[in-house]
Amino acid sequence: MSETLYDVLSPMLATAGLDLVDLEVTGGLVRVTVDRVGGIDLEALAAANKTVSAALDELDPIPGRYTLEVTSPGVERRLRTPEHFARAVGETVSVRTLGGTNNVRRVQGRLAAAGPDGFELEGSEVPGGSLHLAYGDVERARTVFEWGPTAPPAGNRRTKHSKRATTGTQAGAAGAKKDAKTERVTTP
């Protein structure tokens, strides 16, 4: 049923400029994952929801009640098909292989290439620096979001106190201000 729905929904969503990335039908849940070049926003998700909902109402492919979920792939997403891997080329991925199929059980690296039968991982954590895996050897794979460096929280910033001598007199003042303290915040 998923393949039939995929074939029906994919061209409908394409007319709205969206790619049908994944479709899962499990129990009472229909999960439709859509994306587009440059990312997807809430307005596009709402439009996709209306399109998919209308199509499912017309086709009535699922007997009884079900929940429709239209979502974006997210920053860390599952990779299940050769198309998913092809879309993720250049990204960091984490792979868990099936037991007994490869000498590596878990590996993380940059997805260097993806073809119809398998994919290539590269990186310092990959044994030998490069590894080819067949899709049939993969138990689970997902992209890995890499957080960049972060600035320290505002409360942890160091303050630097310095003394600056000022000289001068003010008319009517008892004397000159000396050793005024100035606080500067130094940020990295």
Image (cartoon, grey):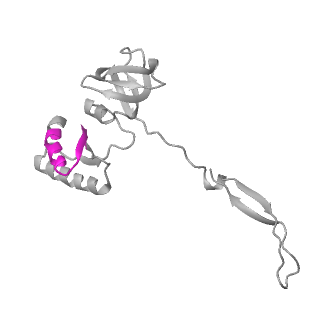
Q: In this view, does 123 lie to the left or right of 34?
A: right
Any magenta on residue 14?
yes
Please name whichever residue, 20 or 30, is drawn nearer the observer in this view of the structure: 20
Rendered position, 34 above or below 133: below
For the N terminus, the quadrant is: top left
Q: In this view, does 160 lie to the left or right of 114?
A: right
Tell me what residue is drawn at x 50 percent, y 43 percent.
148
Residue 69 x %, y %: 28, 47
Q: Quadrant of residue 113?
A: top left
Rendered position, 121 above or below 78: above
Any magenta on residue 90?
no
Q: Can residue 63 be seen in this view?
A: no
Tell me what residue is drawn at x 38 percent, y 17 percent.
99
Q: Quadrant of residue 154?
A: bottom right
Residue 179 x %, y %: 83, 66
Q: What stretch is highlighted in magenta?
A: 5-30
Residue 5 x %, y %: 16, 40
Tell me what residue is drawn at x 38 percent, y 22 percent.
97
Tell me what residue is drawn at x 35 percent, y 20 percent.
132
Q: In this view, does 92 lie to the left or right of 37?
A: right
